[in-house]
Image (spheres, rainbow, N blue to C red):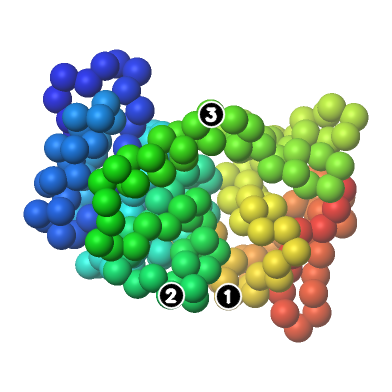
Amino acid sequence: MGHGQAPDAPRLLLVEDDRELGAMLLDVLGDEGYAVDLANDGQRGLHLGLSRQYDVLVIDRRLPVLDGLDLLGRLRSRAVRAPALVLTAMGTVRDRVDGLDAGADDYLVKPFVLDELSARLRALCRRAGGSGDVLRIGSGWLHVGDREVELADGERIALAAREFSLLWVLAAHPGIVHSRAELRRRVFQEAPASSIVDTYVYYLRRKLGRHVVRTVRGLGYCLGTM
């Protein structure tokens, strides 16, 4: 973390395996007022991202141990909602789409100009100060920080951690059908039972109504309505 930062400095997680670039960004971003933690591989980035609170994430696409998009997907599946900027040497449209689908909020291709990186980070921090802590679910809302669903009549229903993670993945991509294998990978990585996704879909329907998760026969599940 940068030295001499103000107590309310925005906290930034930087995951970059190029040690020279990482050290340079650590100094530059620290000088710009961020309190920066630097991780040199995806596994360390995952540990920091799950154990500490950050205002913004900067993640390299190609990382040792754990790929940057896999890292970001795992953070998102555990309800880490800090806005994320992905750095990459791969700048094709397909690469950018893959990054955004994995949960990135912005994408910057290497080599980049430091002023542009700084401007994009400021924009992400401003956006995070808005209403990004809730997601729409039909006539209700999913409150990220509280792990609760607010119904149309104002009633709030608390969700268990895995229930919340599963519903968040579906609500973050409304209209997208997720296969059971994908949901198991993103939400239940350590679970041995192949039926774990179906079990938690049942739990969500029992709490929120049978239509909250829609089954797409032969394909998987997508967000429904309440």
Of marks 3 and 1, which one's residue comes earlier in the chain?
A: 3
Determine the residue positioned at 78% across, 34% down.
Answer: 150
Which amino acid, mark 2? Answer: Thr
Q: Nearer the viewer, mark 3 or mark 1?
A: 3
Which amino acid, mark 3? Answer: Gly
Decide if residue 39 is on the left or right side of residue 163: left
User: Quick one: label 1, few (<14), some, or many (20+) residues within 10 Å?
Assistant: few
Q: Nearer the viewer, mark 3 or mark 2?
A: 2
The image quadrant that residue 110 belongs to is: bottom left
Locate residue 133, reporting x and y percent. 61, 35
Which amino acid, mark 1? Answer: Ala
Of marks 3 and 2, which one's residue comes earlier in the chain?
A: 2
- In the rendered image, which residue does mark 3 sit on? 129
Q: Quadrant of the N terminus?
A: top left
Locate residue 3, reporting x and y percent. 14, 25
Q: CA distance from mark 3 to mark 2?
A: 30 Å
Question: Which disc number belongs to residue 85?
Answer: none
Outermost residue toward the right in this view: 153
- Secondary structure beneath dot 3 equals loop
In depth, the one of 109 and 195 nearer the eye is 109
User: Quick one: label 2, few (<14), some, or many (20+) residues within 10 Å?
Assistant: few
- In the rendered image, which residue does mark 2 sit on? 92
- In the rendered image, which residue does mark 1 sit on? 181
